[in-house]
Amino acid sequence: MAAHRSFAKFRPIKKKTAGILMGVVALGFWAAVAAAPGSVQFRHEDMVATAQAFLDGLSPELRTKAVFPFESEERFRWHFVPHEMFERKGVNLNEMTTEQRRAAHALLRSALSTQGYLKATSIMSLEAVLREIEKNAGASRFNRDPELYWFMIFGTPSKDAPWGWRVEGH
């Protein structure tokens, strides 16, 4: 019964929120139509170069936050819950300069098709929609920000040795 009462707090979506939501849905639809299946040609060498460019563009302080040994237990610790519920490691987009953000997005793009990249960034942008919905409902418990996504590199980007990277957030 308590679950039913919690829904009573929600108010109708305001025009601004509906406009943001429609824009994100339209972007997602455009991405689905624009990218043909099989349009990506993945090259491991490109991802290695993109990851190294990302690291090279970070300040020493941010690089220290972003890089973990490949064998690190951190590689196996990931969550999809808001960051207030789980402390995240790595470097988040809010900490980066414009150029560093471009390099982070290039890394994300290096692993995804055009459609996949647009879908991922559309999902990230939904944080703004969630913020408005929760604010209108009087239920904002979390800091909803499309740039609260953390990037990590595990090991050293290499064509021959194991390494990896991760982006996570909510």
Image (cartoon, helix red, strand yellow):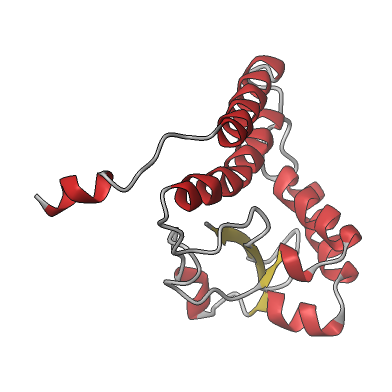
Quadrant in which residue 91 is drawn: bottom right
Q: Nearer the viewer, residue 11 or 101?
A: 11
Q: Residue at x 61, y 59 (%)?
A: 167
Q: Please tell me whether residue 129 is drawn above or below residue 160 in the rendered image.
A: above
Residue drawn at x 81%, y 67% as measured from the top left: 96
Q: How many marks?
A: 0
Q: Position of residue 105 (x, y in %)?
A: 76, 50
Instruction: Classify 50 as above or below 63.
Output: above
User: Could you tell whether 31 is left or right of 48 in the image?
Assistant: left
Q: Is residue 108 visible?
A: yes
Residue 47 appears in view = no
Q: What x and y, as percent, mark residue 37?
A: 62, 19
The location of residue 148, given as percent across then percent down, is: 63, 62
Residue at horizontal 50 percent and vertical 77 percent from the top = 87
Q: Nearer the viewer, residue 129 or 100?
A: 129
Q: Is residue 68 left or right of residue 85?
A: right
Residue 99 in the image: state x and y as whole percent: 90, 59
